[in-house]
Amino acid sequence: MSIVVNEIFGPTVQGEGPSAGRQCAFLRLGGCNLSCHWCDTPYTWDWKGTSDEKTAFDPRKELHNRDVEGVLEELLALGTELVVISGGEPLSQQRRLRPLLKGLREAGVTVEFETNGTVVPDDEIITPGVRFNVSPKLSHAGDPASKRIVPAALRKLVQTPDVAFKFVCRGVDDLDEVAALERDFDISPVWIMPEGKNVAHISQHLSSLADEVVRRGWNLSTRLHVLAWGDKRGI
């Protein structure tokens, strides 16, 4: 069985959410069902240059069919206790990922999925040692609500035993949109993360959000990997 991989790298650190700062390896998969303007990994899906980067990436260069056994061997060789599976949208390949998850868990490795919350997770991948970091997209991402908000997927993810919800925000107005989703889907816990691909933008958005995030009783996440390494790929 094969999976569509963009890159494998590590050791590095998880840059976002409740595990920020923890050493990990990354498995970045190819393909996404959304097209966020500000996406920081457009090279996994943007073949037409529709993101803010205005660059049309070549899927023949960016995507690689890899057998599961080889991917598992490479991830385990990196020697981390955490593997983050991101994309693109990794749950679009969730059935192919089952044997990889099994191999990682048998080796004692914890797994985190970075998902946009539009794909209903299969019961087979909701297992101890697997966390879902769910990042539903707000209106400023550019896609229509009917595409970026999938009630069935959010309701299933809310019920998973190890889950966190991260929202990329630019300003205080975005927080009302988050509050509506929190109310409609009983989302918890909530992490607010400032949008930005460089230190200046992150700092600007973070300072405008922090007080209101605290007032609302939510958690605040920065983008540690951007602060440390900028927008370098494979970090």
Image (spheres, rainbow, N blue to C red):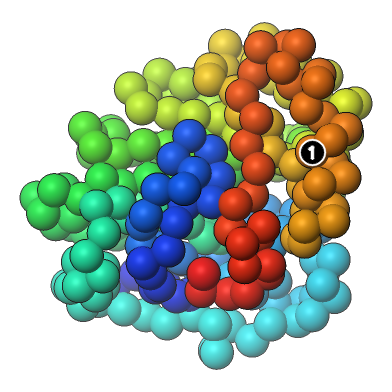
Q: Secondary structure at mark 1?
A: helix
Q: Report the residue that reaches farthest toward the left.
A: 106
Quadrant where the image shows the N terminus: bottom left
| Residue 126 in the image, given as x and y percentages of width and height | 28, 34
Question: Looking at the image, is 203 positioned above or below residue 181?
Answer: below
Residue that appears at 40% across and 48% down: 22
Foreground residue among 167 and 49:
167
Residue that appears at 51% across and 69% down: 235
Q: Is residue 188 visible?
A: yes
Question: Looking at the image, is 114 positioned above or below residue 25?
Answer: above
The answer to which quarter of the image holds residue 129 is: top left
| Residue 128 in the image, given as x and y percentages of width and height | 21, 32
**Residue type pointed to by label 1:** Leu
The answer to which quarter of the image holds residue 180 is: top right
| Left or right: 15 as drawn, with respect to 147 | left
Foreground residue among 75 and 31:
75
Q: Report the residue that reaches farthest toward the bottom.
A: 61
Foreground residue among 224 and 233:
224
Question: Looking at the image, is 139 positioned above or below residue 87?
Answer: above
Q: Is residue 117 visible?
A: no
| Residue 33 in the image, given as x and y percentages of width and height | 62, 55
Residue that appears at 88% across and 32% down: 208
Q: Count numbered badges in the picture.
A: 1
| Residue 214 in the image, given as x and y percentages of width and height | 72, 17
| Left or right: 1 as drawn, with respect to 232 | left
Residue that appears at 80% across and 66% down: 51
Q: Dot 1 corresponds to which residue?
A: 206
CA neighbours of label 1 inside 10 A, class few (<14), some (14 to 19), many (20+): many
The answer to which quarter of the image holds residue 107 is: bottom left
| Left or right: 78 as drawn, with respect to 152 | left
